[in-house]
Image: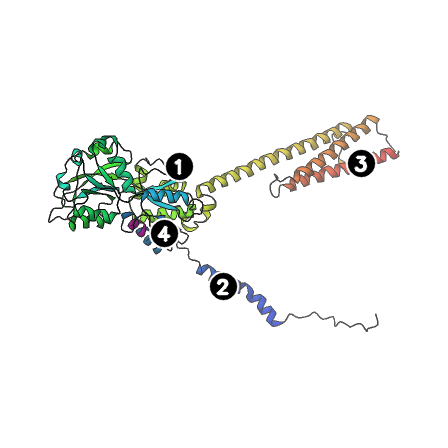
C-alpha cells in the first residue's frame, strides 16, 4: 500500500455524554411504557366476544321478547344477541339445522316436544324455568267446561310452522280427540284473534307466556274468555313435553274478575337449542345472559330432568356444575375455546407425570451405565489388584515386568466394553426423554470412561511395543 499509515493517539475514546444519558434512561423509559400499557388493559370481564343470532318467532310473540331482553343484557356488557324473526318453533328447528353449514344463526328458542329435522346435530343449551301456557280463547269459552264440549268447534291453531300449530295438532288431533269432529285451521296470530273476536272462529289457540301483553289485551280489550279444563293433568300425562298449571281468577283484571274462575291449562317448556356453530366462549356468554335474565335458570336446569331428547351441550354441563362460568372463562374466554379449563388441569397433571416418568427412566438408565462401568473397574482390579489405581496403570512399565497373555486379553475385553459403554452413554444423553440438564450426568460418566480408556489404551500400546 502507498498511503501513509495513520497514527493512533493511543488514548481511549470517551463515550459521548448524550449517549451515556440515553443508556441510563432507557430502563426507566421501558418501565414507564410497560406501566402505561398495563394501565390501559381493562381486566373487567364482559361479553365483548359474544356475537350470536337467535331464531325467536313473530315480533309480537313472547320468544321475540325473550331474545330482545337477552340482547339488552348482552349489549350492556359489550356483547350482541340478535333476534331473528321466524314463523315459530318448527321453522326455528329447520332453519337452525340448515344453518349448521354457514353458521348464519347459532341458537333458537323452541317449544318442548317439537321434533327436530332428521339427521340434525342439535344440542340443548338450556330450559327456561317458566313454561308457556296453551290458551284456547273465544267469545263463549267460559261455557266450555270439559273436553267433550269441544265437539264440532272451529279452532285456529296459529300459523303453519309455528310451535302453537305443532302442539295444538298433536294434542287435539290425538286418538282421544278424534271423535269430536274438530275443525282445525292455520292463521297468523293477530288474524285468528280477530276471527275469534268476530265469532268466525270458536276458539283461537295460543302457546305463549301467561304474562304476555298479547294475552292480556285479548282478555281485557277484545272480550275473549279462556277455556279451562278441570282434568288438564290427565292430558298432560300422555305427552312427555306437557304439564299443567293454573291461571288464577282475576289475573288479567281483578276488578272485573277476568277470568271469573281459576282456569286449568296445559303448559309447554321452552328450550334454548344450538346447532354447534357457536364456540364454547359464545355459548357460555349466552348462558350468562340467560342466568342474568332468569335468576332461577341454573336451579331449574340442575334440579329438573332433561326430557327434550336432545343432548345437553358440554358448555352447559360445566356452567351448571359450577353454577356460573369459571375464572379463566370469565377473564380469558377465548382460551377456553382451545381447551376447557377443567382439561388444563388434566394436561398439567399429565405433563407432570410424563416428566416424573422421564426422570425415573433417566435415572434407571444412568444407573445401568454406572453399574456397567463399576463392573469393568472390578474386572481390572481382579487383574492388577484391588489397590491398583489408574495412576498405577499409567506408570506401569511392561519392559520391567511382562504382562501375562490372559491379562492382556482381559484388558482388550475391558477396552471393548468401555468403548461400547461410552457410545451408549452418548446416545442416551442425546435422547429427548432426558430432562433438561440431565445430560450432564452422562457427560460425567463419559469423562470417567474416556479417562480409563486412555490409560488402558496406552498400557496396551506399551505392551505391544515390548
Gap in angstroms between the C-alphas marked 3 and 2: 64 Å
Residue 397 appears in the figure? no
Image quadrant where residue 271 sits: top left
219 lies left or right of 53:
left
- Tell us which disc is closer to us: 4 or 2: 4
Mark 3 — residue? 457
Mark 4 — residue? 81
225 or 48, which is in the foreground?
A: 225
Secondary structure at numbered mark 3: helix
Secondary structure at numbered mark 4: strand
Residue 349: mark in rendering = none
Contact check, label 4 and label 3, Cβ < 8 Å: no
Mark 1 — residue? 118
Classified by dominant secondary structure, the portion drawn in magenta counts as helix
User: For the magenta stretch, what is the residue range?
Assistant: 64-68
Query: Residue 171: within the magenta?
Result: no
Between discs 1 and 2, the one toward the N terminus? 2
Mark 2 — residue? 32
Between discs 4 and 2, the one toward the N terminus? 2
At 64% from the left and 41% from the top, the residue drawn is: 439
Gap in angstroms between the C-alphas marked 4 and 2: 39 Å
Q: Residues within 10 Å of mark 2 (few under 14, many from 20)?
A: few
Amino acid at each position: 500500500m502507498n498511503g501513509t499509515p495513520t497514527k493512533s493517539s493511543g488514548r481511549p475514546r470517551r463515550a459521548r455524554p448524550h449517549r451515556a444519558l440515553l443508556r441510563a434512561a432507557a430502563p426507566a423509559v421501558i418501565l414507564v411504557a410497560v406501566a402505561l400499557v398495563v394501565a390501559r388493559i381493562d381486566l373487567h370481564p364482559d361479553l365483548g366476544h359474544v356475537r350470536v343470532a337467535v331464531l325467536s318467532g313473530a315480533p309480537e310473540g313472547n320468544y321475540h321478547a325473550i331474545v330482545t331482553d337477552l340482547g339488552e343484557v348482552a349489549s350492556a356488557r359489550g356483547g350482541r344477541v340478535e333476534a331473528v324473526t321466524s314463523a315459530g318453533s318448527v321453522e326455528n328447528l329447520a332453519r337452525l339445522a340448515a344453518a349448521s353449514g354457514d353458521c348464519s344463526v347459532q341458537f333458537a328458542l323452541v317449544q318442548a316436544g317439537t321434533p327436530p329435522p332428521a339427521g340434525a346435530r342439535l344440542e340443548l343449551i338450556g330450559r327456561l324455568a317458566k313454561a308457556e301456557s296453551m290458551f284456547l280463547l273465544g267469545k263463549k269459552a267460559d261455557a266450555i267446561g270439559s273436553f267433550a264440549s269441544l265437539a264440532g268447534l272451529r279452532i285456529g291453531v296459529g300459523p303453519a310452522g309455528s310451535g302453537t300449530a305443532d302442539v295444538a295438532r298433536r294434542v287435539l288431533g290425538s286418538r282421544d280427540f278424534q271423535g269430536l269432529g274438530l275443525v282445525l285451521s292455520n292463521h297468523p296470530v293477530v288474524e285468528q284473534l280477530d276471527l275469534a273476536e268476530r265469532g268466525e272462529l270458536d276458539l283461537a289457540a295460543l302457546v305463549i307466556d301467561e304474562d304476555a301483553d298479547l294475552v292480556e289485551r285479548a282478555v281485557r280489550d277484545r272480550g275473549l274468555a279462556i277455556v279451562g279444563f278441570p282434568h288438564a293433568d290427565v292430558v298432560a300425562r300422555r305427552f312427555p313435553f306437557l304439564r299443567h298449571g293454573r291461571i288464577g281468577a282475576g289475573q288479567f283484571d281483578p276488578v272485573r274478575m277476568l277470568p271469573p274462575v281459576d282456569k286449568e291449562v296445559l303448559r309447554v317448556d321452552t328450550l334454548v337449542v344450538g346447532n354447534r356453530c357457536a364456540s364454547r366462549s359464545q355459548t357460555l356468554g349466552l348462558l350468562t345472559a340467560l342466568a342474568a335474565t332468569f335468576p332461577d335458570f341454573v336451579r331449574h336446569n340442575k334440579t329438573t330432568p332433561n326430557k327434550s331428547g336432545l343432548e345437553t351441550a358440554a358448555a352447559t354441563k360445566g356452567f351448571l356444575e359450577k353454577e356460573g362460568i369459571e375464572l379463566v372463562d370469565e377473564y380469558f374466554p377465548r382460551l377456553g375455546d382451545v381447551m376447557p379449563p377443567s382439561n388444563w388441569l388434566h394436561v398439567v397433571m399429565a405433563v407432570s407425570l410424563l416428566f416424573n416418568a422421564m426422570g425415573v427412566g433417566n435415572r434407571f438408565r444412568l444407573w445401568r451405565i454406572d453399574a456397567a462401568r463399576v463392573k469393568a473397574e472390578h474386572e481390572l482390579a481382579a487383574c492388577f489388584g484391588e489397590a491398583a489405581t489408574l495412576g498405577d496403570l499409567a506408570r506401569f512399565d511392561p519392559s520391567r515386568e511382562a504382562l501375562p497373555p490372559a491379562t492382556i486379553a482381559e484388558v482388550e475385553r475391558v477396552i471393548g466394553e468401555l468403548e461400547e459403554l461410552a457410545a451408549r452413554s452418548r446416545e442416551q444423553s442425546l435422547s429427548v426423554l432426558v430432562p433438561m440438564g440431565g445430560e450432564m450426568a452422562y457427560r460425567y460418566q463419559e469423562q470417567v470412561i474416556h479417562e480409563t480408556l486412555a490409560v488402558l489404551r496406552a498400557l496396551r500400546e506399551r505392551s505391544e511395543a515390548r
